[in-house]
Amino acid sequence: MNMKMSDRLELVASFARRGSRIADVGTDHGYVPIALAARGIAEAALAMDVKPGPLSRAEENIRRFGLEEKIAVRLSDGVRELRPGEADTVILAGMGGELVIHIIQDGKRLWDDIEHWILSPQSEIDKVRRFLQGNGFRIDEEAMICEDGKYYTVMDVVRGVMEPLDELQALYGPVLLKRKDPCLCRLLERERRVYGQILDGLAGQEGPAVAARREEIERLLSQIEGQHWLE
């Protein structure tokens, strides 16, 4: 297969289970379902997008690799056009955390039908983790990668009970913290420097908003510095 995917998308694809039926929501060029079908990992796949343009590009790529029999394309706002029984795995990657939450919530009728959710929010990942915890989902695995200076997390999510998350776990991932993930270690070292710079910038400033911001940063900095494995 002559198609080069980014390291981020390769990490997303690595979470798919062999023999699964994939629904890739917000598929863009269709690279992930194409890779999974071509490698024999996905038994079948749906490339879904809310916009006709990306879906057309995905369709062209699917034809180019001769995978029309394995991958179908479908115009869909999130998972609204996904029918029960069509997929056992949903991929939500490359979108903001609020949108990830909205799509999962909007697809509540599928919660007991989908065995496996592969999530990679681009923002507000703490809100996503707290939403999962509060709605009967469990994070079984997490991985982190740094690409072009930006850190990306991919989560393997199933239905189940998750232990309550503290602030640091919600922000950076309970599995990554427990594993003392090397990539997370580099991110936390960077966060520690950034928070220190923010505190320096707040020095000498007064007012309720400044005091609240200083308290928030000091709390987060204290929690990060409490991770002794960083030293």
Image (cartoon, grey):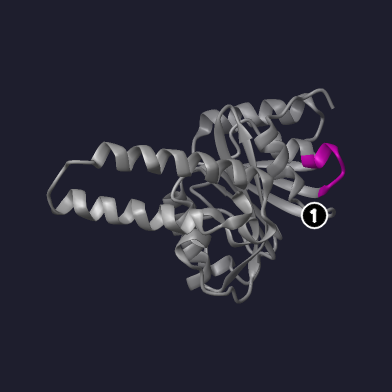
Pick the residue in front: 122 or 179.
179
Residue depicted at x 53% and y 28%? 53
Q: Viewed as shown, does residue 155 lie left or right of 192? A: right
Q: Which residue is mark 1?
A: 17
Residue depicted at x 51% and y 59%? 226
Pick the residue in front: 199 or 111.
199
* CA neighbours of label 1 inside 10 A, class few (<14), some (14 to 19), many (20+): some
Residue depicted at x 46% and y 50%? 97
Image x and y of residue 116, in percent: 68, 61
Q: Is residue 9 depicted above or below 177 in this figure?
A: above
Q: Which residues are magenta?
A: 36-42
Q: Quadrant of residue 39?
A: top right
Q: Quadrant of residue 37?
A: top right
Q: Residue furthest right?
A: 40
Residue 49 visible in this rendered orientation of the protein = no
Q: Is residue 38 on the magenta stretch?
A: yes
